[in-house]
Image: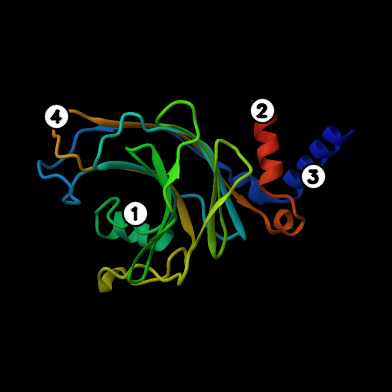
Amino acid sequence: MRTITLILVAVALALATPAWADLQTLTGTFSGPDADTSQDNGLGNHHYDIDRSIVYNVPLVQIWGTVDVSGLQAGSYLQIGLIDKEQADMSMDSFGVPGYMFNNSAMLTFFSNNTAKLIDKVEGGTIGSAAIANPGATAGEWNFQMELDASEMRVSMDGGSTWTSQSYGVRNWWDGAAVWSGGELEYGAYALVQMWVDTGDTVNPASADYDVTVVPVPAAVVLGGIGLGLVGWVKRRRK
């Protein structure tokens, strides 16, 4: 009976709230060597996958998926999260510099040393959580669930019930230059997966696999108290 009730609730919500139709997936493999012989100079190779249809105009965004970063080396990392819509459009369309502003956003970052962090750019610098050790049995392979609302990021690894949180703090855009002024996620956001390679090795590639699902959660679901639990339940049933 409980299973049937949950199915009926999920169907009713899907029919009543069009925002569920905004569910998007980003899946693929990044691979490539460093683009510059100098290590840790911030000019390394940059790979990204962006969905420009998702706009952060709901109370909650949930992101879940799997990544395999066992092919990363020191000086490279993989990031998943939301980027400011206006700044991304300006970067890609107006200035022709794809990815230039993508590092200034709300991100879950996976590092080569088999740890991860919640990282956010704010005015004056960066805030981030403590390092999260990989709870998986295989180094470099992660299974994660993530939530972002108006003030905080939260993440759970391997589908567990323990959440690590990071407050956004003052939610102003990191103002590295006057031309990039604006508010972080203030004008909506896009979903992004990106990899930076700054290893100093211009021959041997770093690599990462990713399979990510992003869902803007309607207010009706948030206010009704049905959030990640329902989504996670549906995902587990699919598996």
Relative placement, left or right, of 146 versus 81 is: right
The local secondary structure at tag 1 comes to loop
Quarter of the rendering occupied by the C terminus: top right
Q: Residues within 10 Å of mark 1 (few under 14, many from 20)?
A: many
Mark 2 or mark 1: whose residue is earlier in sequence: 1
Disc assigned to residue 102: 1
Q: Residues within 10 Å of mark 4 (few under 14, many from 20)?
A: few
Alpha-carbon span between mark 2 and mark 1: 32 Å
Mark 4 or mark 3: whose residue is earlier in sequence: 3
Disc assigned to residue 203: 4
Image position, residue 16 (x, y; %): 76, 50
Mark 4 or mark 1: whose residue is earlier in sequence: 1
Image position, residue 223 (x, y; %): 74, 60
Relative placement, left or right, of 166 versus 21 is: left
Q: Are marks 1 and 3 in contact (CB under 8 Å)?
A: no
Mark 4 or mark 2: whose residue is earlier in sequence: 4
Q: Quadrant of residue 38?
A: top left
Residue tagged by mark 2? Answer: 238
Quarter of the rendering occupied by the N terminus: top right
Alpha-carbon span between mark 1 and mark 3: 36 Å
Residue 46 visible from this viewpoint: no
Q: Residues within 10 Å of mark 3 (few under 14, many from 20)?
A: few
Residue tagged by mark 3? Answer: 12
What amino acid does circle 2 point to?
A: Arg
The local secondary structure at tag 4 comes to loop
Residue at the image position 24 percent from the left and 54 percent from the top:
96
Alpha-carbon span between mark 4 and mark 3: 53 Å
What amino acid does circle 3 point to?
A: Ala
Alpha-carbon span between mark 4 and mark 1: 25 Å
Image position, residue 31 (x, y; %): 28, 31
